[in-house]
Image (spheres, rainbow, N blue to C red):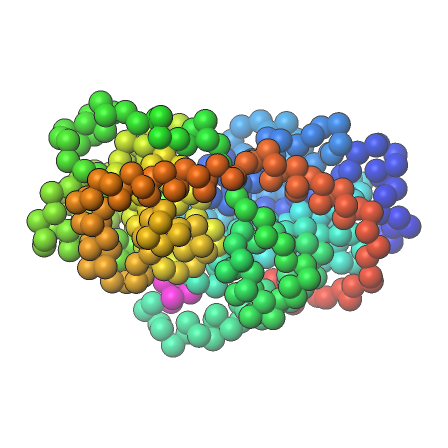
Amino acid sequence: MERSSINDSEEATGKVKVAFFTDILIKDYDGAIKTMYQLINRIPDDRFEYLFFCGVPPKHEIGHRVVKVPSVIIPFNISYRAALPRLAKKRLLGILDEFQPDVIHISTPSLLGAFGLKYAVERHIPVLSIYHTHFISYMRYYFKKVPFLIKPTESLIAYAYKKFYNRCDLVYVPTHLMINELIDYGISGKSLKQWHRGLDTNLFNPGRKDEAYIRSITGNDKPCILYASRIVWEKNIETLFDIYDEAEAQQLDVNFIVAGTGVAEVDARVRMKNAFFMGYLSHSNLGKLYASTDIFIFPSISETYGNVVVEATACGCIPVIARGGGSQALVDDGKTGFLCEPNDAKDYIEKIKLLLSDETLRKKMQNEGRQYISLLSWDYLTEVYFSDIERLTGKHLPEKKALPIEELSI
């Protein structure tokens, strides 16, 4: 089916039609999906009509049509399900042809993302994607027991990234560091655009501090060190364990608090036997926890962005994080927090001890962090997104070479 104009449906309905592809659409599942919902919750219904394709649908009504795609659990990450569009190819193509999207939004270069991209390429429909997950950095964790596979797999993914993202018309990337890394993989800088992640300052601010709340968790008034994120190996959890062990060895008089769940949680509870484990927390409770603790540690080097770093900073919980991945761009080292050698537990502990011993430094970093956070606004960022979607419908698109779906996936 060849369309005579990508604006036909827009002329008929007065709205831009967007087909949105994402494997998982459960609210608050991870940072990437939190970002998606900032967009979903702000869709201007008078300007846009969205149709969502996903392997794991939302558990609540989102106000837009959702098409469920067959999915399967990933063997090396049982908390994640991958959609398998080929199992429902005819049905999905029929729905897409009936909808006639003006723009395709693809969340990730998965099998479902490749399906959406192939559809767009064959019909000359513009594509927007957001680089949410730095998947290539996960390989050192997924294949740590077979390290000889790490480099070949990373090369394969880099090749797939190049094939996939060079066929998108616009790719949002959260930091300039990550843009440079993607260019190194061979992705054209012409389609890459820095698009920050925003923040809900009503939920994440120092005013949420609640001393009674934190005392009810710890039973004492000791300084609190917080880790908040999914408890999965690709977050460099082994280094989190090492930091805890080093603190214990140095008899650091602090509380360790861990918020989140994941496949490594059982190991974490064994390895960090005196830590306080909070499990999954809502945004509201997470904001209160950040504001009520003192230092945020985050050893992950696999982040594309690192929402939790910004959330902690906004609440006055000073970040002490790894010098690696996209998260490092969110900390002005020595000014809004500290960057540490990724796997050096003693480096983290030295920075933590410095902060605990110097109240003037803590207050200065908190003030600097608040000034940085004040520049982020979801309302502004989402309007940039919707304006770019509208712009894509009106741009002249050169004909793209259609590729087999196998070449568009990883």
Q: Residue at x 35, y 49 (%)?
A: 335
Q: Residue at x 39, y 60 (%)?
A: 324
Q: Residue at x 52, y 54 (%)?
A: 175
Does residue 297 lie above or below 181 as drawn?
A: above
Q: Is residue 112 visible?
A: no
Q: Nearer the viewer, residue 45 or 375?
A: 375
98 vs 328, left or right, is: right
Give x and y (percent) for residue 10.
84, 38
46 vs 171, left or right, is: right
Q: Does 120 lie within the magenta span?
A: no
Which quarter of the figure has residue 292? top left
Q: Quadrant of the C terminus?
A: bottom right
Give x and y (percent) for residue 229.
36, 44
Give x and y (percent) for residue 360.
24, 41
Q: Which segment is the magenta one?
A: 139-143
Does residue 348 lie above or below 146 as drawn?
A: above
Give x and y (percent) for residue 200.
48, 32
Q: Nearer the viewer, residue 373 or 282?
A: 373
257 vs 30, left or right, is: left
Q: Residue at x 68, y 54 (%)?
A: 170
